[in-house]
Amino acid sequence: MSYIALSGLSSAQLDLNTTSNNIANANTFGFKESRAEFGDVYSNSLFTNAKTAPGQGVQANKVAQQFHEGSSVYTNNPLDLRVAGTGFFSVAKERLIPQQNELTRNGAFHLNKDNYMVTSNEEYLLGYQVNQDTGDVLSYEPTPINIPAEFGKPKQTANIEVGVNLPANGDLKNPALFDYSDPETYNRSTSSTIYDSMGQSYKMTTYYLKDQTQPNTWQTYYTVTDKAGEKPVNVAGGDATSGTHTGHTMKFNNDGTLASLNGGNNIVTEPLGAGANPIDMNGADVNQTLSFGLDAATQFAAPFELTKFDEDGATTGFLTKIDFDENGSVLGTYSNGENITLGRVALVRVANEQGLDKKGGTQWDSTQFSGDKIWGESNKGSFGTINNGTLEQSNIDMTQELVDLISAQRNFQANSRSLEVHNQLQQNILQIR
């Protein structure tokens, strides 16, 4: 009887400890509740009667974790991730040894000083390298995910494509009087930014005026502003002239479509560093030229409207925003306007979650009982889907845990009372004379 009561006390204590641990981790992101599982102890021999054998107590079989999903808590941090499904994140303690990794459901990540995504314990989140243009995975060999603070080398502007509607009822202007410093001499102007080969930016302004000397005709002139101020940029082979400023002529059909453009639809300026009054290109490429594509220009009875503007120049970009898509791809937005796919978060699953080895810190590792790690990605197969800006709370049901705590406490008290009665009986027997 004494052994039976002691086994009951030990099991009740384990149940109390398990429930207390669950309650203590109620606010731990990605935590999975545990459940103490017990079995009876029964032994029989040739010298006992199986019909009257009472059993030998209770034993702890296992403390099993329950891997059902917890609820979501929404945050304002784009690096907070959760898996909706059965997958796990994979993290490595050593950046250069990603093969040694563990699993977690805690998606509270941040960037370290080297711009790697890490956990609160500075463990590296693993993912796959991707083609930055197509977003396709290049290799399914997991590596730490890095989000560069800067992206792209400077690229000088070489091509500009413009789509603009020039109003058919615009005021007529005299091209001979055009002066970019006098707004009365042109109809409208637009400004854009161009870059030299070192990534230095310049303001480029386009001026439009409706020619009073020719029907359905517009003249266009350009200037670039450098440190010394605004200077004219001449079009090579242009036929629209105003003093020393050479632009080009656009003629439109009666239906408002573009009929002709001197030199073709691509207008090439003179080198920006050439001429008597060159543009200061910051010591970069003093022979930089620009090609203008204007084939999308129209003249409709509608207000002036810039319908298209594309240019291929860029400066070095600085990280301004991080986001994730439903496939787990890391999307970086940079100040130079580049939107880059930087990698894809890896997800892992195992055949038997109950066989995972608990490592603490809401992390697990695979064992021979769980089966090998199976690598995959979000939104494919049974790995689940990654959502950002949200975390998975622990899957603890506090009401049920409190009920279990009371039950375990009563069980402990009952076994204590059983042991106390047994001791009292032994004392009574010893006192018989």
Image: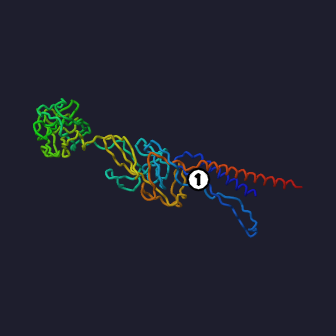
Instruction: State the image coordinates of residue 369 (x, y, percent, origin top left).
Output: 54, 61
- Count of numbered circles in the view: 1
Q: Quadrant of the N terminus?
A: bottom right
Quarter of the figure with residue 174: top left
Is residue 309 among the parts visible in the rendering?
A: no
Q: Foreground: 197 or 187?
A: 187
91 to the left or right of 6: left
* Residue at 34% across, 47% down: 340
* Coloring scheme used: rainbow
* Image position of 231 with respect to 128: above or below: above
Q: Position of residue 38 (x, y in %)?
A: 65, 58
Instruction: Measuring from the top left, give residue 252's x and y in whole percent.
Output: 15, 44
Please tell me whether residue 51 is drawn above or below residue 192 in the rendered image: below
Q: Amino acid at mark 1?
A: Ser
Q: Is residue 343 left or right of residue 372?
A: left
Residue at (16%, 43%) from the top-left corner?
A: 267
Left or right: where 260 falls relative to 136: left
Secondary element under disc 1, as helix, strand or loop, is: strand
- Residue sticking out furthest to the bottom: 46
Please indicate, yes or no, whether residue 117 appears anywhere in the rendered image: yes
Which residue shows up at 55% across the image and 58% down it? Answer: 354
Q: Crowdedness of circle 1 by 10 Å Cα count: few (<14), some, many (20+)?
A: some
In the picture of the structure, the residue carrying the numbered disc 1 is 34
Work out which quarter of the rendered image holds the C terminus and state it.
Answer: bottom right
- What residue is at 37 percent from the left and 52 percent from the top? 129
